[in-house]
Image (tube, grey):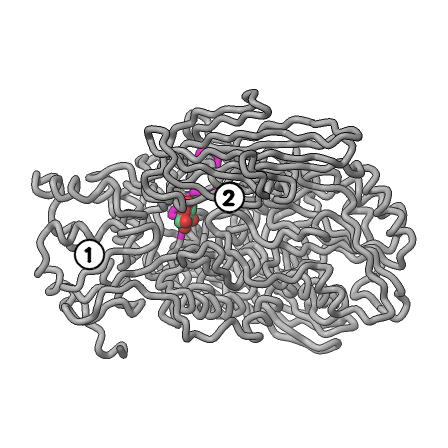
Amino acid sequence: MTSLSLPDDAELRRRIRALDLESKVRLLTGDSLWTLPAEPRLGLLPVTMSDGPQGVRGTGADPDATGLLAPAPSALAATWDAQLAERLGDLFATEARRKGVDVLLAPSVNLQRTPVAGRHFEYFSEDPLLTAALAAGLVRGLQARGVGACLKHFVANDSETDRTRYRSRLDERTLREVYLAPFEQVLAEAAPWSVMAAYSGVEDGVDSAPMTEHARLLQGVLKGEWGFAGPVVSDWAATNSTVASAAGGLDLVMPGPDGPWGENLVAAVRAGELDERIIDDKVLRLLRLARHTGRLGLPGQEPASASSEDATAPAPAPREFALLREVAARATVLLRDTAELLPLRLNGIGSIALIGPNAVTPYLQGGGSAFVPAAHTVSFEEGLRAQLPEHVRLTVHRGGDSRRRPPFVPGELLTDPDTGAAGVRADYLDADGNRIGGEVRESGDWTIYDDFGPTTHRVVLHTVLTLSEPGVHRLEFGCAGRFRVTVDGEQLLAGDDDRGVELVLESSHRYPTLQGIDVEVGAQARRITLGIDLTVVEPGGYDRFVTAQLLHAAPGPTPYEEIAEAAAAAAAADVAVVVVGTNEETESEGWDRTGLDLPGYQDELVRKVLAANPRTVVVVNAGAPVLLPWADEVPALLWAWLPGQEAGHALADVLLGRTEPSGRLPWTLPARAEDVPVPDARPHDGIVTYSEGLHIGHRAWDRQGLVPAFPFGHGLGWTEWTYESVTAPQTSVSAGHLTGPAGGDGLQLTVELTNTGPRPGREVVQVYLESPQDGPERPVRLLAGFATVHAAAGARATARVRVPARAFQIWDTAMRAWHTPPGGYRLHVGRSSRDLRLTVDVTSYGDRLHTVV
Ligand code: BGC
């Protein structure tokens, strides 16, 4: 269908008039976990949604269906390159089409308000402007190919603890200038076709409501003031009311088919509690989304099938892998290189010791709904081996485990107690305790979704674990919901949590209740009989499930022994590359961290390796800040993010000089936990108070005058830059549109710079605005614009940086409008928030700006 033949809104309204109230309301709740209902009378085909933003998870029935895994958004943000984000959006669109997905539940433009936030990796930056620029690029790339974006989570949903219940308390200026800002800017620049309302609520001094019911923000600001014409979709299972949410501006309840709307909403309209025109508007918005995504045909004509996985679509192409690799390599931040170790010069190197828990098991993506099973991944070891010449010997050493939990019991240690067959036997029981089915699996991982049949009420596991290796074995068991674990007939652990959907939303991304025992094995093998009785969890909307994890650590070297072995290997090698980082126990949706230390014994490992070999490169494999107490002692330090499937190739590209690590930190890396401006995100009495106000991230560090380990915007690349000059238009420019999208055009700065280093390079030219401090409170400096340039060694480059008028403005609470306070402003141009090289002064006379020459 070409765009010319698409029905206009008047035609859609006509179609809607043909439906009765029940039929319309039916369309406003999903008909499954991921799809929206079809309505042949409207020509509406089912619209399929799926999670991002690290890729496109897909909705295929096969849980092992796999796809492309991109670097996490905080990595993408480190490129500071909206065009690259657009190319990634285009790739996601191809992948979405392959998987039959019409709307990608991405990007997430909440802000990294605190470094401990569980979804920090999934958000772009601590800065609203950088966040918006990257997110807008991604949305453009996606939607240009007919796949809808869903901008989430609207709004001030920046932490996870108690995430379905808390309200964020922040003043109206902070809400407007910081947390609404990326939503507003992305809407203005890229017009995403849907927006997701968050679980949490907002209390901003004007009113207080959960976001699914927040009439002033959804109806007033988003739809009214900003003119958003698409549907507002609830976060999954976030809607807890009928009239309040429907009247408040929510358009679609997800998932379905159950939920608080349906017949309750029909009854509310019939009772006069809600005007039917409100329902019509919701259906219209849904139809607009369908129209954009090619899911709207002619009434009565097309069969109502969901977009299906496109079997004819070409498999992921080398071009796609290459883009994922380019993003991961370019995002890498060179934090320090005091000994000019990088890129490694291989002619003097005969051996490399690759060390660290994350060298052995890289952490490629954050956990939670963003998780994408990847079809193929490249470990750091594989990537290096693929590029190292034959004469370089590569050895790999874990140097101690960083995980608290042991791995799953290997299937070969388990046997069915009745038949002696290998594995664990599961009996499926109905509500009366009758056996109605079962299965045997050779695995210690017993998380099962709905495969056990609709009448199964309990799943009971039986197995015998045989331990023969002498020494102390550690066994741990993890379950969720209602369960009972017995070891040799004795109860070890039991749970009686009979919540449904809350268990999924609050705990599914988190490891379940764990209990462990140590078992001493001597000359004789030990046989341990295990019984695990699990009641099926019924989380309305989501798949029914049971979970039992049988974990086992065999006797082995202690972490200190492993560290000593790794240090000896480092001493014997020409270069040591230590990869430290987080893991699936650290960074995920569903919970916030309680601290910023690297998990396990990794600090000790780095120190021992450094002492053993001064030619050590440390690579941090993490999406969110972790403290690096040894950072000042390391000659070369790289931040390699959660890099996605091409991790190993990208790291090898950087280490061996194929791609410049041209990333710049999109957040501030603290040196000490006690300096962190917002150290935790725990609600108190249900409220998360944003007491730092406008001073998020680097703004707070500047305000407090504290020195971080590495500042916002920092990244060395591998050349040097001289900033020659900055010029601004000499005539006055209008900067004070009070109503225009994101506040009018602003100024364009022209920055001349020279690559004075030895190699070609990419530079991110950053502009920070200092506002007059004699009026309303302003941040000391804020990021007001940036641009990337590329130049050969010795060459000059010109960066044109747009500073939007909005950067100069404040939200005037009394006037309910944007306003540019008069006075002297200074724009600093530099390499990071703490490396400012040039300035230009600007005077504002209210709504006009004059460059001061
Ligand atoms: C997350 C959303 C996600 C949705 C669907 C929610 O728990 O907050 O980001 O899109 O689940 O998986």
What predominant SS class does the magenta segment belong to?
loop
> Which residue carries the number 1 mark?
283
Q: Is residue 597 left or right of residue 216?
A: right
Q: Is residue 343 left or right of residue 213?
A: right
**Residue 27 falls in which quadrant of the image?**
bottom left
Question: For numbered disc 2, what is the local secondary structure?
Answer: strand
Q: Residue 444, image x and y in percent? A: 58, 41
Q: Is residue 118 above or below residue 476?
A: below
Mark 2: few, some, or many residues within 10 Å (few <14, many ≥20)? some
Q: Residue furthest top?
A: 490
Kind of residue indicated by mark 1: Val
Q: What's the magenta region?
A: 152-162
Alpha carbons under labels 2 and 1: distance apart: 47 Å
Q: Is residue 600 left or right of residue 239?
A: right
Q: Residue at x 12, y 49 (%)?
A: 22
Q: Residue at x 86, y 58 (%)?
A: 575
Q: Residue at x 30, y 63 (%)?
A: 306
Q: Is residue 396 above or below residue 98?
A: above
